[in-house]
Amino acid sequence: MKLSNPPFDLISQLSSGKFGQYFKKICIPKKRILLVPDEVNHKIYFIEKGLMRCYYYANGEEITSWLACENNIICSMASFFTQKPSNEYIETLEESIAWEISFESLSKCQETNHDVPISNSLLLKEIIEQFDKITMILRHLAPDERYLFMLNNYPNIVHRTPLKYLSSYLGMAPSTTSRIRTTLMKHE
């Protein structure tokens, strides 16, 4: 989900000043699992470089629920904001660099610094607005329109995400996604 105020404007403010103590810059290898079901998502990740996804299993099938790359954030939303166990995995799809902040640190930062430019409610509002927008659009569009929406609005994600994960996120079979890609290439 891309925030309307890119997190790296925010991260540069936070990490360099009095808020820096609350953030930790981490390098994460490709295919690293950052969260598994039944764990509480204690951290939110601001992605500086790389590609990550959230996914879960339904009826034995892996479903990608969220894709994020540079200048985006990722977490298991319900788990992070309620501090209850998640039903999702978070995985890196590429070697990634991210800035993490724990729920506890974010709360502490807000309590001690009333001028902090980030808050749980602001993050939640931004994430819900973006998630809701994408969900509504993807739910009501035909498969080729879904792909085009993602290609036009999130080209980095479309070009870098493995076909099976992108297809799952778009709610279509990999063969459908491949057919749409082939058709679009012929028309270029």
Image (spheres, helix red, strand yellow):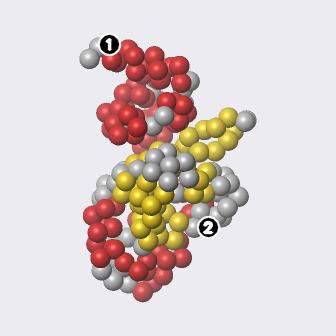
Q: Where does residue 181 sit, x and y in percent of width and height?
A: 40, 21
Asked if marks 2 and 1 touch (Cβ < 8 Å), the reply is no
- From where the camera sits, is residue 121 visible? no
Residue at x 56%, y 63% (from the top left corner): 80
> What amino acid does circle 1 point to?
Lys
Q: Which mark is residue 168?
A: none
Would you say 85 lies left or right of 93 here?
A: right
Would you say 13 lies left or right of 51 here?
A: left
User: Distance between the Cα atoms at labels 2 and 1?
Assistant: 48 Å
Few, some or many residues within 10 Å of mark 1 (<14, 14–19, 20+): few
Residue at x 42%, y 73% (from the top left corner): 23
Q: Which residue is mark 1?
A: 186
| Front position in the image: 50 or 107 | 50
- From where the camera sits, is residue 61 visible? yes
Residue at x 50%, y 49% (from the top left corner): 30
Q: Where does residue 21 sit, x and y in percent of width and height?
A: 41, 80
Up-down relation of residue 156 to residue 79 (above or below): above
> What amino acid does circle 2 point to?
Gln
For the C terminus, the quadrant is: top left
Up-down relation of residue 157 to residue 85 (above or below): above
Q: Where does residue 41 sit, x and y in percent of width and height?
A: 59, 63
Total marks placed: 2
Q: Which residue is mark 2?
A: 83
Few, some or many residues within 10 Å of mark 2 (<14, 14–19, 20+): some
Helix, strand or loop for disc 2: loop
| Front position in the image: 81 or 31 | 31
Helix, strand or loop for disc 1: helix
